[in-house]
Amino acid sequence: MYDIAIIGGGVIGCSIARELSKYKLKTVVLEKGTEVCQGTTKANSAIVHGGYDAKEETLKAKLNVKGNKMYTNLCQELNVEFKKIGSLVMAFDEENMETLDILYKRGLANGVEGLRLITDKNEIKILEPNITDKVIGVLLCESAGVVCPFDLNYALMENAITNGVELKTEHDVINIKKEENCFNIDTTKGVIKSNYVINAAGVYADEINKMIGGDEYYIIPRKGEYRVLDKSESKKINHVLFQCPSNKGKGVLITPTAHNNVLLGPTAVEVDDKEDISVSDYSLEFISNSAQKIIPKIDALKTITSFAGLRATPNTREFMIFASNKCKGFINVGGIESPGLTAAPAIAEYVIHILKNEGLEFIENESFNPYRKKAKPFRNMTKEEREEAIKADEKYNKIICRCEQVTEAEILDAIHRPAGAKTVDGIKRRIRPGMGRCQGGFCGPRVVEILARELNISIEDVIKDKKNSKMILGKMKEERKETANA
Amino acid sequence: MQSNITCIVCPMGCRMTITKIDDRFNVEGNTCKRGVKYGIQEVTAPKRMLTSTVKIEGSVLHMLPVKTSDSVPKEMVFDLMDILNKVRVNAPIKVGDIIIEDVLGTGVNIVATRSIQKIS
């Protein structure tokens, strides 16, 4: 019997989990995937927004600004890469300039720090040397930045586990029934009982809400497709670069990532299928054309991969964070689209606040440890640090991923931590093998071998990310029980 | 009957037209006499070379590359692959070793295209 069950192990669910671990409560995270961070959190722009975009007085605006202010400290505690590089919204004509003015005033009203309107072309060129000459003004926000959303998700869950939270993966919620003060959560791996339920189920949040009779919102999955550019392009850009927003969203942007790649995108396409994360040729072309308008020198041909994520856009266009009045003890945290990643730490605190109002008793956990330790990546070590690391652990002497210089020691660490990697993509998102130029061509088979050995499973049972995503179907020239199309 | 084909004998890749008049063939578009021979063969009884691998035990690699010693009827290729998929050979192998003699009654052999040592 748990005090709280959180449905969804994305950045929102795990932020709430970590916040709850500061108190003496029995908390469990129910994640339907094979690991946490397999939904929207693994496919977004990774931007920590300033907070001038969301309308004044909205929950989105308040939690965006509050969350932004918490990021530096949070990422320091959890040892997550956060780069406060600042953002520029660009104006190309008078209409854009009016929009910039609106955003500037909105930002000030929302309490955003580090905002400045700049129309001096020389100053703009100093900030961003490769920006198009067609820019006539920018809104600079110094408090914006980029983060590694995967690492943040994993770090939050890991720290929550360290502080007493349980994680149950492959627990897909099928039904929820309330009996007196207890929720019976029926999952694919058995029934979980809890006094409170927090619905942080991303694009499926409306379906979870429906299980207890809730209908306050529905989710319209809106796909965003991206191009990822090779690290060699990152020297062409200093800030997160936005075009003027429209009612469709913030538009195609160019941004450096926390690990020095460049993202071009996203598109904004409504889809019916909540599992449709395909990338279309049309979108790829649209993205590179849009990007060229911002930084003419950017080379879209240096694309090393593309991906898509689904925004959990609610029909209400506002964060749906409230205690259900259809079923006491059920807290919705739905419709978390942009600026969800930025707002995550603030959303967690807000949920605590809601739970307090619902009557849950909060006693502080004196042994709460806010820190997640993580060794410096081998690729960032100096020659002396590398020699020391190898002396202490010889597995540092074996490079598995050549493109990103990742050693076997780091892979073993990623697997054996709390909420550790169980899949090929899990290794990829934690420490980067498969994210470099060769996209897993060299390291792929080696990572599969290591996973099989460390998880004590056969090579044929190693999966890429989702449950039936086998990497290897069988030995060559032998009878196969299933084919690639099964 | 008229066929337009691309000759595969050499990298020139001549676009040829083969026409049948009565019971004789006329080849146009070739640059050499090998093309004539290929063109007529292709429209009467097409043949193919097959290069593939067979499973090998007792060596550091698990697959041994092989080829047909001569071309075989095109329609036999899939049956030939079914046979190759069931072959098991043991190391050591020398390049040129005959793995299967006179496969499927074609008079063609399957030969190893590399040597490989036995591991203890």
Image (cartoon, rainbow, N blue to C red):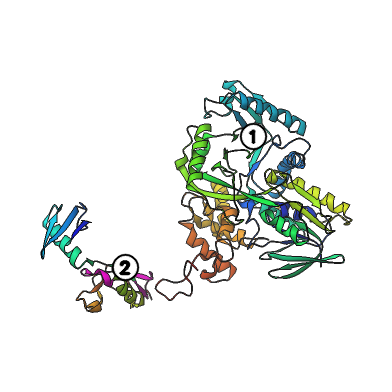
Graded by Cα atoms within 10 Å as few (under 14), some (14 to 19) or many (20 or more), the crowding at tag 2 reads some
| Relative vertical location of residue A250 with respect to residue A433 in this rendering, above or below | above
Residue on which the image places disc 1:
A86
| Relative vertical location of residue A410 with respect to residue B119 in this rendering, above or below | above
Total marks placed: 2
Q: Amino acid at mark 1?
A: Gly
Q: Is residue A92 left or right of residue A211?
A: left
Magenta segment boundaries in residue numbering: B54-76
Q: Is residue A90 left or right of residue B40?
A: right
Q: Where, by quadrant of the figure, is residue B83 drawn?
A: bottom left
Residue A316: image x %, image y %? Answer: 73, 45
Name the one closer to the observer, A431 or A467: A467
Does the stretch in magenta take in B57?
A: yes
Residue on which the image places disc 2:
B52
Does the stretch in magenta take in A389?
A: no
Q: Is residue A130 left or right of residue B105?
A: right
Name the one closer to the observer, A387 or A221: A221
Residue visible at 19% across and 76% down in the picture: B107
Residue A323: image x %, image y %? Answer: 82, 53
* Callout 2 and callout 1 share a chain: no
Mark 2 residue element? strand
| Relative vertical location of residue B5 with respect to residue B112 in this rendering, above or below | above
Q: Where, by quadrant of the figure, is residue A81 drawn?
A: top right
Quarter of the rendering occupied by the N terminus of chain A: bottom right
Circle 2 chain: B
Mark 1 residue element? loop
Q: Where, by quadrant of the figure, is residue B23 drawn?
A: bottom left
